[in-house]
Image (cartoon, rainbow, N blue to C red):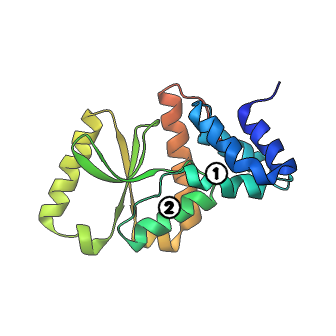
Amino acid sequence: MTAIPRTLLDFAAVEPRFIGAALDRAEKRALLDLGRLDMLLKRSQGFRGVARLRAASEAYREPAYTRSRLERRFLDLTRRAGLPRPSMNLFVAGYELDAYWPAERFAVELDTYDHHGGRTTFESDRLRQEDLKLAGIEMTRVTGKRLDRNPDGVVSRLRRLLGQRRSELGLGPLPR
């Protein structure tokens, strides 16, 4: 007996013409878990069928809605780092969050001085962070400059923060 993601990978390797139909059936039966599928695909680099299954599964993913080049760069950075995909520009606890991981109740606000440099914005940003904390949501800020100058540092800290948050919530380790 094999898990659904592994069965789909095996199927993609031997019956690539029908992988779309297999994914449809898994989704209709509420057996398609994209998180588990992504973990398997990451662990299975180099195996036959990985590229086909990854491409076929894209149709089942919600497109990420981004408003800025900074958001697109951040989303691409998290993808390349193998981090779980955040929801982008999602309304939570009365605020629109730039990047949000619902399971971890963790948000990242992407800041640039041009957009967040005034006194009014400075004050409202602090209130926003407190309101989110009161709603049980942890938040961190990443500046555009830091994303440009030290993307590896951003990934390293984000991985640690997400892992810490998962531990606090009893969710187990961050999927690799």
Viewer-nearest residue: 161 or 27: 27
* Left or right position of 152 against 51: left
Image point 75% across, 41% down: which residue? Answer: 8
Tell me the number on the disc at residue 158.
Answer: none
Residue 23 x/y as whole percent: 66, 43
Q: Quadrant of the C terminus?
A: top right
- The residue positioned 27% from the left and 41% from the top of the image is 132
Q: Is residue 176 at all visible to an observer of this figure? A: no
Distance from disc 1 to disc 2, alpha carbons, whole Å, reads 18 Å
Marks 1 and 2: which is nearer the front? 1
Between 16 and 141, the one nearer to me in the picture: 16
Name the side, left or right, on which 119 lies relative to 166.
left
Disc nearer the start of the sequence (1/2): 1
Q: On the image, numbered disc 1 is attached to which residue? A: 57
Query: Percent x, y for residue 164?
Result: 52, 37
> Which residue is drawn at the image coordinates 83% and 43% (left, top)?
10
Q: Is residue 101 above or below residue 122?
A: above
The numbered dot on residue 75 is 2
Q: Amino acid at mark 2?
A: Leu
Note whether 102 is above or below 118 in the view shown: above
On the image, the x and y values in percent for residue 87 come to 43, 50
Kindly state the secondary structure of the residue where label 1 is placed: helix
Q: Secondary structure at mark 2?
A: helix
Q: Residues within 10 Å of mark 2 (few under 14, many from 20)?
A: many
In front here: 110 or 95? 95
Q: Is residue 30 visible?
A: yes
**Residue at the spot 69% in from the left edge and 54% down from the top edge:** 54
Q: Give residue 135's position: percent from left, percent from top.
A: 27, 34
Q: Quadrant of residue 141?
A: bottom left
Which of the 4 quarters of the picture holds residue 30?
top right
